[in-house]
Image (cartoon, helix red, strand yellow):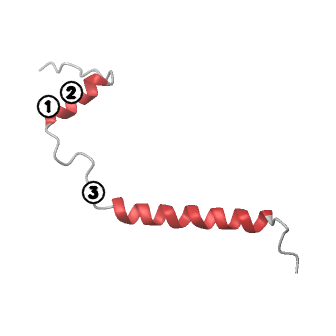
Amino acid sequence: MNTGRFHLRSFLLGVGIGIIITSIISLIYLSGRDPFEGLTEEQIIARAEKFGMVRKQQSY
């Protein structure tokens, strides 16, 4: 048996399975979280202005 040989196909299969398992675990873990939980509207607006997002003035 030649155990010292590098098998590219097996390596790529292992990496692919690892990516799939990691993404499934991430989806399960993050599925119930709200990214804006605990933020007030003023805090969200302040962060948006910090990143250069401009809020248009509404005319009635």
* x and y percentages locating residue 54 in the rendered image: 28, 20
Residue topped by disc 3: 33
Considering only order in the chain, which callout, 1 or 3, is on the residue closer to the N terminus? 3
Asked whether disc 1 touches disc 2, contact meaning CB atoms under 8 Å apart, the reply is yes
Q: Which residue is label 2 attached to? A: 46
- Asked whether the residues under the numbered discs 3 and 2 touch, taking CB atoms below 8 Å apart as contact, a structural biologist would say no
Amino acid beneath label 1: Glu
Q: Mark 3 to mark 2: distance in Å? A: 22 Å
Crowd around label 1: few <14 · some 14–19 · many ≥20 (10 Å): few
Instruction: Residue 53 in the image: state x and y as whole percent.
Output: 31, 23
Q: Residue pushed farthest bottom?
A: 1
The kind of secondary structure element at disc 2 is helix
Report which quarter residue 48 is drawn in: top left
Left or right of residue 53: residue 41: left
- Determine whether, in the image, residue 12 is placed left or right of residue 31: right
The kind of residue on which mark 3 rests is Arg
Q: Quadrant of the C terminus?
A: top left
Amino acid type assigned to the residue bearing label 2 in the image: Ala
**Crowding near pointer 2: few (<14 within 10 Å), some, many (20+)?**
few
Q: Residue furthest right?
A: 1
Taking the image as shown, residue 48 lies to the left or right of residue 57, namely right
Rounded to the nearest whole Å, what is the CA distance between mark 3 and mark 1?
21 Å
